[in-house]
Image (cartoon, helix red, strand yellow):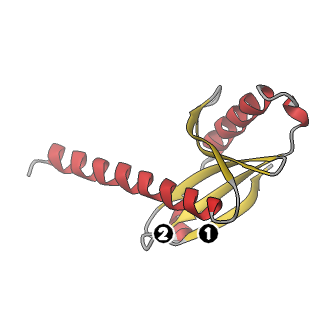
Amino acid sequence: MSAEDSRRTRGAQAYHFGLSAEDIVARHYTERGYEVLERRWRGAGGEIDLIFRNGDEIVFVEVKASKTHARASVSLGARQQARLCASAEDYIGRLPSGLLTPMRIDVALVNGAGEVACLENALM
């Protein structure tokens, strides 16, 4: 296998691991009574992995997957945080209550075993 093929294979595996992690996190939230509003929503700053409603509150979730929760937790850099916040603001701005809508941004960490650790209000 060439180096190029190896990179493609690793890229495809990472992509599918990410999709699987998003599905696991979506189940994690829906089992707790949250309603899925959007998956992979694109806003002003970029993509938001999952958006839920919990009562009146809108919950934006960035999913990070890696072999360990610790590795996943360090993969959200400052620029990505800023883009996530910009997209959340864009989404909220389109709702009838606009910026008065209760909201939070969570980061959901998924390890190689499929275990979820949610950091509520991770970005303020």
**Mark 2 touches mark 1? (CB < 8 Å):** yes
Residue at the far left in the pictured view: 1
Question: Where is residue 89 shown, x and y percent of the image?
Answer: 76, 33
Q: Which secondary structure lies at badge 2?
A: loop
- Looking at this view, is 107 or 34 the one in front? 34
Q: Is residue 100 above or below residue 121?
A: above
The residue at the point 30 percent across, 48 percent down is 11
User: Closer to the N terminus: mark 2 or mark 1?
Assistant: 2
Which numbered circle lies on residue 31?
A: none
Classify 10 Å Cα crowding around label 2: few (below 14), some (14-19), many (20 and above): some
Question: Where is residue 114 shown, x and y percent of the image?
Answer: 46, 70
Tell me the residue that label 1 is attached to. 117
Tell me the residue that label 2 is attached to. 111
Residue 75 visible in rendering: no
Q: Which secondary structure lies at badge 1?
A: strand
Classify 10 Å Cα crowding around label 1: few (below 14), some (14-19), many (20 and above): some
How many numbered dots are placed on residues in this image? 2
The residue at the point 86 percent across, 39 percent down is 101
Identify residue type, mark 1: Ala
Q: Is residue 36 above or below residue 90?
A: below
